[in-house]
Image (cartoon, rainbow, N blue to C red):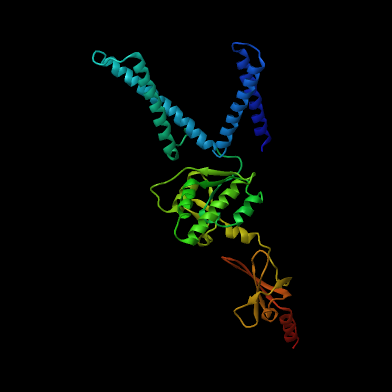
Amino acid sequence: MNISIAFTRILFVILSIFFMSAYMVSRDGGWTSTHLWMGVGLGLILSALLIGFDLLFRRFNLRSFNVAVLGLFFGYLMGQALVLILGAILKISAASVHLQPQALEIVQIALFLFGIYLGTLMTIRAADEISISIPFIRFSPTSQKKKDLVIDGSVLGDARILDLASSGMVDHYLILPRFLIKELYILAESQDESIRNKAKRSLDMIKKLEALPELGLRYNDTDFPDVKDPMGKLIRVARLLDANLLSADMSRVQTSAIEGVRIINLHLLSNALKPLMQAGEQIKIKIQRYGKEPRQGVGYLEDGTMVVVNGGGDYLGETIDAKVLSVKHTTSGRMIFCNAPDEEDQGDYDEGH
């Protein structure tokens, strides 16, 4: 927990207990132990409610807060306008309309609350179309801005995102659109067992990401009902938030940007972090199966990199020292081509003759 947040919570707990105790003691009856303990109890309840609200809204960002405040302001103006219009109507039709003062107050309060509610709701729904700026002035950042990452659905089905999030390398926010979560819940009820299991694994991955204390995971309520393609929605969300898109879709390995949104592919990132072998190096590799060519064997490094060994078919199930010939880069990763020890000896013999 952030030290400043912990300090603020403790401070408000103390203030809540102090003010509630002071209020109870100042009531009729004065200073009594009963009033004091009642004040302490009320202070603890109040502080628990405050911290509860804090935990409830911790996933909300500053943008959501600004939209809510702006909506309340517009709603206040709308409510005041409705009350003024009602007053003008009553003055004009004073001879035909007679309302009791209590009834008039109730109608005014109802109109005022209706205006606040309607103004706030309309502002929240149209938040994507609101742009607040200072006219004719543009601020240029002095340093390069870090962009948040909007999570693609394919990422949630890849266990490597949990390792990436736990590594501490992601120092900006991961943004998870709520329409993506709704879609996963729908798929979790599918009749197709593979689709149902995949959706459930993705939902479990969300819970694991939420449990990471140092990860900045935020939810976004923006939706585009007119867009049916989920990828199109994600691109529009990323463009709206000026964020990048994190994907694990193999079909997008060759795609670096779509409609002004940069796509960061988890496969390319994983391949970039794999150890690079140089020609002539010796590696230990266990031959696990036969290759496509005669006497060819195939093994795998710990990170999943495929190693093709010429002459390795004679050592099936054994761990041998192979010599690296070359490294080939493919869309699905790297492939390392090697020679088995007997192939190297044969090569030396041929060169000598």
Q: Residue furthest left?
A: 96
Q: Residue at x 48, y 59 (%)?
A: 195
Residue 72 in view of the camera: yes
- Quadrant holding the C terminus: bottom right
User: Measuring 66% from the left and 80% from the top, which residue is drawn there?
Assistant: 313
- Farthest residue in the bottom direction? 353
Asked if residue 263 can be seen in this view, the reply is no
- Left or right: 116 in relation to 36: left
Q: Residue at image x 32%, y 21%? A: 85
Instruction: Looking at the picture, tell me which residue is in the foreground, 13 or 248.
Output: 13
Vertical side of 240 occupied by 92: above or below: above
Residue 96 relative to residue 236: left or right: left
Q: How many marks?
A: 0
User: In the shown orientation, is residue 319 left or right of residue 254?
Assistant: right
**Which sits in the foreground, 347 or 79?**
79
Q: Percent position (x, y) of residue 330?
A: 58, 67
Q: Residue furthest front?
A: 34
Q: Residue at x 60, y 54 (%)?
A: 161
The percent position of residue 29, horizontal first and vertical second, equals: 61, 11
Residue 168 falls left or right of residue 93 = right
Q: Position of residue 342 (x, y in %)?
A: 73, 82
Q: Is residue 223 above or below residue 252?
A: above
The N terminus lies in quadrant: top right
